[in-house]
C-alpha cells in the first residue's frame, strides 16, 4: 500500500467522522457556555481530565476531556486542524480506522500527560512533609476554586499539579499532524498561509518545539507533553498498522 500517490486536496469536503467530531466539539462548547452562565455548572471541571489522585478524577475523563475547550480560539484552531488534516486522513484510511486513530491518540495524550504530572507531583512531594501533602489533598481543590492557593510555594505548586484540569482535542490533533507528516512527508504545508514547508520538517520542528516547551516552561497552562503524547501514540500505531499490512500481504503471496 502506497500513500505517496495520494494527492491531499479537496479540503472543502467533510467526511462523516470529521464532520461529526466537529459537531460534537461544538455542541460541548456551547453546552459549557450555556450551563456555566445559566446554572453555574463548570462542565470543563466535570469532564476535563484530572490527576488520578484527585477527588475530582473519573476514568471517563480520559475520553471526555478531548471534547472540552476553554475559549473560542482554543476550539477554533483545534477544529481547523481537524478539518485540514483529518479530512485527508479519513479519505485515505476510511471512517473506522480514522476514528480509532483519533481516539487512541487522544487517550494516549492523556496517558502521557498523567504520567508527566505524576513525575512532577512525586518530585514536589519530596520537599514536603506528610502533613503538608495531606493538607493539600484534603483542602487544595476548594482553595483553588476560591481563586486562592497556599502561601507555601511548594504546597502551592503541588496543589496546582494535583488539581489541574486538562482539556482540548490538541493531543488527538497533534496525532493527526504526525500522521499527515508520515503519510505525505513531501506535501507542502503553508505557514501563515504563504510560507511553504514540507510536512515531514513541519512535524519534526513542531515536535521539537513542544518537547523544549514542555521541559522549559513547566508552569505553562499549555499541555505540551499531551501534544507529544498524541504524536508518540500516533507514530507507534501507524508503524503497527504498516507492519500488520505487510504481514498480511506477504502471507497472501505465499
Image (tube, grey):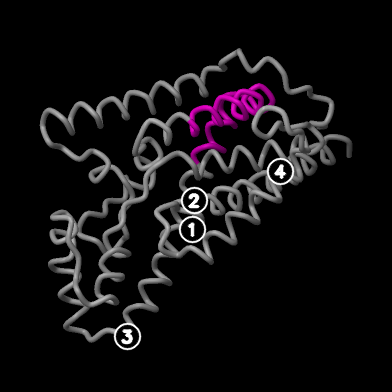
Q: Which residues are magenta?
A: 77-103
Q: CA distance from mark 1 to mark 4?
A: 22 Å
Give the class, few, some or many, for how many residues have Cα within 10 Å of label 3's Cα (few <14, many ≥20).
Answer: few
Of tags 4 and 2, the one toward the viewer is: 4
Give the class, few, some or many, for how many residues have Cα within 10 Å of label 4's Cα (few <14, many ≥20).
Answer: many
Q: Earlier in the sequence, mark 4 or mark 3?
A: 3
> Residue tagged by mark 4?
202
Q: Earlier in the sequence, mark 2 or mark 3?
A: 2
Of tags 3 and 1, the one toward the viewer is: 3
Tell me how many marks there are.
4
Q: CA distance from mark 4 to mark 2?
A: 20 Å
Residue 120, horizontal then vertical, whole percent: 41, 71
Tell me the element at label 2: helix
Q: Are marks 3 and 1 in contact (CB under 8 Å)?
A: no
Going 56% across and 53% down the picture, which residue do you hit?
228
Which of the 4 image quarters holds residue 20?
Answer: top left
Residue 86 is one of the magenta-drawn residues: yes
> Residue tagged by mark 3?
127
Considering depth in this image, is 47 or 254 the residue closer to the camera? Answer: 47
Q: Residue furthest left?
A: 39
> Residue tagged by mark 1?
112
Residue 97 is one of the magenta-drawn residues: yes
Q: Earlier in the sequence, mark 3 or mark 1?
A: 1
Query: Residue 7 vs residue 232: left or right?
Result: right
Q: Specify the label residue 109 is tagged with.
A: 2
Amino acid at each position: 500500500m502506497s500513500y505517496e500517490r495520494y494527492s491531499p486536496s479537496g479540503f472543502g469536503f467533510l467526511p462523516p467522522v470529521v464532520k461529526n467530531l466537529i459537531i460534537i466539539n461544538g455542541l460541548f462548547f456551547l453546552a459549557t457556555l450555556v450551563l456555566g452562565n445559566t446554572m453555574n455548572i463548570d462542565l470543563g471541571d466535570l469532564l476535563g481530565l484530572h490527576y488520578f489522585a484527585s477527588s475530582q478524577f473519573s476514568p471517563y475523563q480520559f475520553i471526555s476531556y478531548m471534547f472540552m475547550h476553554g475559549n473560542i480560539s482554543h476550539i477554533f484552531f483545534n477544529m481547523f486542524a481537524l478539518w485540514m488534516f483529518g479530512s485527508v486522513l479519513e479519505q485515505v484510511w476510511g471512517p473506522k480506522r480514522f476514528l480509532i486513530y483519533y481516539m487512541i491518540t487522544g487517550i494516549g495524550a492523556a496517558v502521557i500527560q498523567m504520567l508527566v504530572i505524576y513525575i512532577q507531583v512525586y518530585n514536589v512531594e519530596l520537599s514536603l512533609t506528610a502533613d503538608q501533602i495531606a493538607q493539600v489533598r484534603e483542602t487544595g481543590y476548594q482553595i483553588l476554586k476560591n481563586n486562592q492557593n497556599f502561601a507555601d510555594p511548594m504546597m502551592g505548586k503541588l496543589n496546582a499539579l494535583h488539581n489541574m484540569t486538562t482539556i482540548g482535542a490538541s493531543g488527538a490533533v497533534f496525532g493527526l499532524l504526525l500522521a499527515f507528516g508520515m503519510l505525505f512527508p513531501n506535501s507542502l504545508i503553508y505557514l501563515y498561509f504563504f510560507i511553504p514547508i514540507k510536512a515531514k520538517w513541519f512535524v519534526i520542528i513542531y515536535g521539537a518545539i513542544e518537547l523544549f516547551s514542555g521541559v522549559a516552561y513547566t508552569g505553562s497552562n499549555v499541555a505540551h507533553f499531551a501534544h507529544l503524547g498524541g504524536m508518540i501514540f500516533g507514530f507507534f500505531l501507524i508503524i503497527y498498522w504498516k507492519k500488520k499490512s505487510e504481514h498480511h500481504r506477504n502471507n497472501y503471496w505465499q
